[in-house]
Amino acid sequence: MSLPENYGKETAQIELEIERKGVILGIDWNDAAQVRQLAHDAFHCRLGQADCDVDHPLRRARVELFALAQLMLAVMTESAENGVESHGGAAWKIFARALWLEKESAATDKTGAPPSTSATE
């Protein structure tokens, strides 16, 4: 029998790292346009491409931030599958909202509908 995961602790640790990457990258989590651009970049980042290589410290921090977002989603998915509700903090919620809007925008772009530009919808 394995011990239950401490999802609250895990999400708090990931949130702290997201905040740290935000400081390194100069992200203003209250700037909807900046965060939306970051979400757009996350969706289009492909390792090895010029804007997504890890040889430069700031680009590495960006890629690590994108990886933290994937990790947070994985932890939250696993916790939900185990019947445990978990939450990220303020920075995560803002970034997650922008990621969701970017995903919706990409989907509507394929259907011909205009993409959303507001991160507060």
Image (cartoon, grey):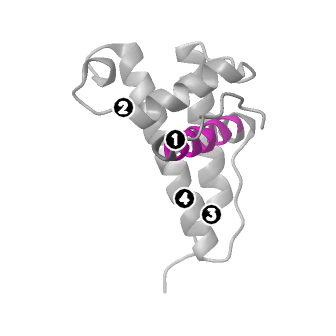
Residue identified by numbered label 3: 6
Residue identified by numbered label 2: 45
Q: Which of 79 and 115 is in front in this view?
A: 115
Residue identified by numbered label 1: 112
Q: Which comes sooner in the sequence, label 1 or label 4?
A: 4
Marks 4 and 2: in contact by CB < 8 Å?
Answer: no
Residue range (magenta)? 94-108
Cα separation between marks 4 and 3 = 10 Å
Marks 1 and 3: in contact by CB < 8 Å?
Answer: no
Q: What residue type is labelled 4?
A: Val
Does dot 2 land on a helix, a strand or a loop?
Answer: loop
Residue drawn where x is 50% and y is 47% of the image: 111
Cα separation between marks 1 and 4 = 34 Å
Of marks 2 and 4, the one in the foreground: 2
Cα separation between marks 1 and 2 = 23 Å
Of marks 4 and 3, the one in the foreground: 4
Task: Using a 10 Å C-alpha cutoff, classify the residue at mark 3 as few (fewer than 14 neighbours), some (14 to 19) or many (20 or more).
Answer: few
Q: Which comes sooner in the sequence, label 2 or label 3?
A: 3
Number of the label disc, if any, that sits on residue 75:
4
Of marks 1 and 4, the one in the foreground: 1
Spot occupied by residue 90 in the image (x, y as percentages of width and height): 75, 37
